[in-house]
Image: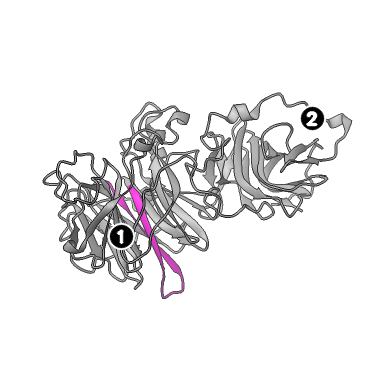
Amino acid sequence: MFRKKVLLSTVVSMAFLGGTEFVSAQTNSDKPKEIKENLEEKFANVSPKLMSDNANPLLDFMFTADPTAVEYNGRMYVYATNDHQQYEKVGKDGKNSYEHIRTLVMMSSDDMVNWTYHGLINTAEVAPWTGVSWAPSITSRLEADGKTHFYLYYSNGGGASAMLTSTSPVGPWKDPLGKNIIDHSVPGVDVNNPFDPGVLIDDQGTGWLVFGAGKPKTIYMPDNARIVKLGADMMSLAGKISKIPAPYFNEASDLNFINGTWVYSYCTNWDERTEWPYTNIAKPTGCNISYMTSKTPLDPDSWKYRDNYFKNTGEVNVGPFTNNHTHFLKFKGKYYLAYHAMYLQDYFGTTGGFRNVGIEEMQVDEGNDVNIPMVTATFKGPSQLNPLNPFVLQQAETTGGTSGKVQFEAVGNVGNMVAKGKADKQCLMVRGADFSKKIPSKFEAKVKGKGKIDVYVNNLKGTPLVSLTCDEKEWTTISKKINQKKGKGVENIYFVFNGEGFLFDEWKFIY
């Protein structure tokens, strides 16, 4: 809602954009008090990315794990287990036993460093017959009705796999079956734990599902990974369930199709590698991600063990040792591996085993045999694919880093979130905004409640570029003039805001 009259005090605003000074109008009578608080120091210890060039973890205000991803309309949509639901239940001194998790997390990006939080898929409401929900896997396909349909599979506890559908990547989601797609009642499901589903649609439009987990009959015996062809409806099985002889298999099945080759990835177990039949391939380390390839995936003898390509994050000192779960896909001409590590435990003051999704660029040789070199987990993460445009409407829930105390709540359309303020100062940052061709003359934001936003560009030093004050009971778009001389650069933007019950929905600069 727009108000005809919004009373704002005139604020002296000065900041540096790409090394160039911005100056706005002022009067001596309403000159602001000198800012004595060191905001960089205040926010330095709340996120591994807010005050650095780090792009991992993707979201730094909540715990997430077990990622999957799908591309749609130029954005990568990532879905994850909501470890934060467990954390909220047991607290920082509790353990992540996964028993309280009944939601999945949604987020997306078009540049791989700024991520838009789309909220949660509440499986307890959508499919109330299910139990805990973990480890989603998603794919999509343009169907006869002219709509792209999204098919999301997930672990219904340790004993089954369920699925949901939507015609939007952010929902609303529906439960089309009202039962598990995979559990022990299905003929051929003879694995200990038929969970951790991985879904794929190949170049012929055929769906495939991999799943399984559990202790094998012997340490090496690879007999708990399974693959099955899906029916045309993606909700039924279209044939016999077959084995994938994955050595030292543990869990986290995933499937890709590259140049006529099925690529199966999985997490190895922790057992000592006492048996190893391959003379030219090194034994995989504990709890890493290994892969196998096949041209005829329903033939167990056709699968070849290739190598391991992602070590446990504890091996490379990105957090402590944890379990391992990955998904890789091609996006804008590059391959990316999504995974989880315990990035945020120190910042949240816990050692309970709470995880966060990160992402890395990876190399994949798409030749006839498909080859995947080693990928290493980092805090640095991928580079920004394209700069953020600050002159088009941007969502407050799109962030490259936060203060760690910011909360979000759903408002309006499905998948839309707004930042929710507290009494203390909080910070949202977006990375790599492009001011190189246009000079901002105004800043505007859609806000509600009582609070204030101070906008800094490049860093949090000095006085803000512009400040907005709000005291509105309804959603209001407030704008503030910036009288600048000149400015160029690609810079980070920091939004420092506070106010009890203050809501921040969207923003943009105007030139």
Residue 263: image tag: 1
Q: Which residue is mark 2?
A: 32
Drawn side of residue 359 relative to residue 269, left or right: right
Drawn side of residue 46 relative to residue 330, left or right: right
The outermost residue toward the front is 280
Picture quarter containing residue 363?
bottom left
**10 Å neighbourhood of mark 1: few (<14), some, or many (≥20)?**
many
Q: Residue at x 42, y 32 (%)?
A: 345
Drawn side of residue 159 relative to residue 21, left or right: left
In this rendered view, identify the residue nearer to me: 153 or 228: 228
The outermost residue toward the top is 36
What's the magenta bit mostly, secondary-structure-wise? strand
In this rendered view, identify the residue nearer to me: 66 or 263: 263
The image shows residue 407, relative to residue 226, as above or below, that is above
Magenta region: 134-157
Q: Residue at x 31, y 71 (%)?
A: 232
| Residue 2 coordinates in the image, percent (x, y) | 72, 51
